[in-house]
Amino acid sequence: AQSVTQPDIHITVSEGASLELRCNYSYGATPYLFWYVQSPGQGLQLLLKYFSGDTLVQGIKGFEAEFKRSQSSFNLRKPSVHWSDAAEYFCAVVMYSGGGADGLTFGKGTHLIIQP
Amino acid sequence: GAGVSQSPSNKVTEKGKDVELRCDPISGHTALYWYRQSLGQGLEFLIYFQGNSAPDKSGLPSDRFSAERTGGSVSTLTIQRTQQEDSAVYLCASSTTVQETQYFGPGTRLLVL
């Protein structure tokens, strides 16, 4: 069965420091990959996605992610975090086949805390 | 343009009552998805619609859950005889087609007392 692992439940980063959130997936083939962010009381906002092509993808709010097939990883990075980045971050994957669809499979999320 | 909207934003109900949750997708989006977010289970996929059709209902947690979509637009998720374990945030998403990016609504927070 497909699965997504976000090993870090909580991460604390100082404002201005760099950030990397880890995501590993378990699939037989390369899935479509996403990072979403959820602020308190808000819905999920798409940060970036990878379907194919360049393995380094740029997203909104200065985030980027790199797809590494050999490691089955899709880690999210940001060079310098801002206090407004404090939120819950979800990695998600989906496989499409035969013209049908599955829902997104989400990791458990990483709670990002920004300290002054 | 307008995003995915959901109503109500919050719903408190008594155990055993039925509830209806509504989702208005982005205009023109043919695919619509329902998810549930709870502390214990995280984010779970429930069901999707392509047009008015739901090809696979196996993700619904029990036969108390049903969903429909009419006119290729609005969808309702109905939970009959609610139980306390149904308490969660129910999220709706839509996409232009089934193989495109899903955009999420703000969710309906359901509390079953």
Image: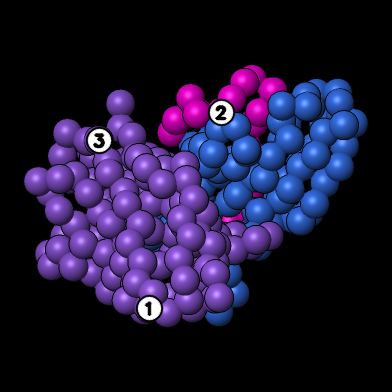
Shade of chain A as shown in the rendered figure = purple
Give the magenta part as a residue range: B55-77
Question: Callout 2: residue from which chain?
Answer: B
Residue at mark 1 to residue at mark 2: CA–CA distance: 41 Å
Residue A60: x %, y % from top left: 39, 76
Residue at mark 1 to residue at mark 3: CA–CA distance: 30 Å
Answer above or below: position of B6 versus A93. Answer: below
The kind of residue on which mark 2 rests is: Leu
* Label 3: element kind: strand
Residue B60, labelled with which disc? 2
Looking at this view, is B100 or A37 the one in front?
A37
* Label 2: element kind: loop
Q: Which residue is mark 1?
A: A80
Question: Callout 1: residue from which chain?
Answer: A
Quadrant of the image containing the C terminus of chain A: bottom right
Q: Residue at x 69, y 23 (%)?
A: B64
| Number of the front mark, 3 or 2 | 3
Q: Residues within 10 Å of mark 2 (few under 14, many from 20)?
A: some
- Residue B56 in the magenta stretch? The answer is yes
Question: Callout 3: residue from which chain?
Answer: A
Q: Decide if residue A63 is on the left or right side of residue A41.
A: left
Quarter location, residue B6: bottom right
Q: Which residue is mark 3?
A: A26
